[in-house]
Image: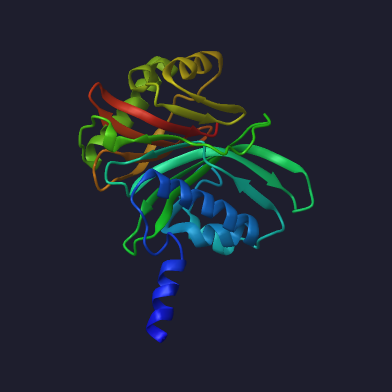
């Protein structure tokens, strides 16, 4: 009887024990993070789902999320969100999602803050989906938390493997090109798969729409690379750094036509 109870416990504890390696599991992890946070509060939610090395971006610099939220006093605010775009590596154990969030001062209040979250995930050594980096932007547009998610599986796309030094080099190269060419420097790295999140603007997807937005706004050109992380399949990586206007977070892949900037989050 005791052994039966152990088996039942294992199979009912959810994705954190037997984490599946696919985009559906990634989306499930994100939604579980959101629902747990709504039920238990922002502090407990982030402490439960952040990786031990997970990063958050409360100011100009990235900081360890566990340390940051452990020191937070907590409050009655209610944060809810949901994914609308998810990208998974060929290995199925690394990816990101992005989507709208809603913030209330308390459960009985109306929405007081809106914006876009972006979370980078991996499966840790214990087989659990955990957040490696989480960054948000703000906007005023009323966007509902979506029920459906656009998905991209890099295992179904022709990609090239690369190492960490290569993605660091391309990130620094883009930063140097931005100083010389301004926002036009993004063009070679943008495709229909690219997604940009920037403060004060609803998210934009696709090279054409991103290019049009960048032409219409003042975008920083003094980005400075700080660090990076890479998928075990070496087909997807994230980089992060800062500019005079705030931090940035990027996700890269390398495909047949060259480097693709899948995601950029910046808080200018």
Where is residue 199? Give x, y as percent: 58, 31
In the image, taking residue 202 as reference, residue 240 lies left or right, namely left
Closest to the observer, 249 or 96: 96
Q: Residue at x 49, y 36 (%)?
A: 149
Q: Residue furthest bottom?
A: 1
Where is residue 178? Give x, y as percent: 39, 21
Residue 62 visible in this rendered orientation of the protein: no
In the image, taking residue 165 as reference, residue 246 lies left or right, namely right
Closest to the observer, 89 or 239: 89
In the image, residue 100 above or below residue 62: above
In the image, taking residue 135 as reference, residue 41 lies left or right, namely right
What is the image's colouring? rainbow
Q: How many marks?
A: 0
If the image is split into quadrants, where does the N terminus sit?
Answer: bottom left
Residue 104 visible in this rendered orientation of the protein: yes
Where is residue 29? Give x, y as percent: 46, 52
The image quarter in which residue 200 lies: top right
If the image is split into quadrants, where does the C terminus sit?
Answer: top right
Where is residue 167? Give x, y as percent: 27, 36
Q: Residue at x 72, y 58 (%)?
A: 76
In the image, residue 74 above or below residue 206: below
In the image, residue 181 above or below residue 197: above
Q: Residue at x 45, y 51 (%)?
A: 55
């Amino acid at each position: 009887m005791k052994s039966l109870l152990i088996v039942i416990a294992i199979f009912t504890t959810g994705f954190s024990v037997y984490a599946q390696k696919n985009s559906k599991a990634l989306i499930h992890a994100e939604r579980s993070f959101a629902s747990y946070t709504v039920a238990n509060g922002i502090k407990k939610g982030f402490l439960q789902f952040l990786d031990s090395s997970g990063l958050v971006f409360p100011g100009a610099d990235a900081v360890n999320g566990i340390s940051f939220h452990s020191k937070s006093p907590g409050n009655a605010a209610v944060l809810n969100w949901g994914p609308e775009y998810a990208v998974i590596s060929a290995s199925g154990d690394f990816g990101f999602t992005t989507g709208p969030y809603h913030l209330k001062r308390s459960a009985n209040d109306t929405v007081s803050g809106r914006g876009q979250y972006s979370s980078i995930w991996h499966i840790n050594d214990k087989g659990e989906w955990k957040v490696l980096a989480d960054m948000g932007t703000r906007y005023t547009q009323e966007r509902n938390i979506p029920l459906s998610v656009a998905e991209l599986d890099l295992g179904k796309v022709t990609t090239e493997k690369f190492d960490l030094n290569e993605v660091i080099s391309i990130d620094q190269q883009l930063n140097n090109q931005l100083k010389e060419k301004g926002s036009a420097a993004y063009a070679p790295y943008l495709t229909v798969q690219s997604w940009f999140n920037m403060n004060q603007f609803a998210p934009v997807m696709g090279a054409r729409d991103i290019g049009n937005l960048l032409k219409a706004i003042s975008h920083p050109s003094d980005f400075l690379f700080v660090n990076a992380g890479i998928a075990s399949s070496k087909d997807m990586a994230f980089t992060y750094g800062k500019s005079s206007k705030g931090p940035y977070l990027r996700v890269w892949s390398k495909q047949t036509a060259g480097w693709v900037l899948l995601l950029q989050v910046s808080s200018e």
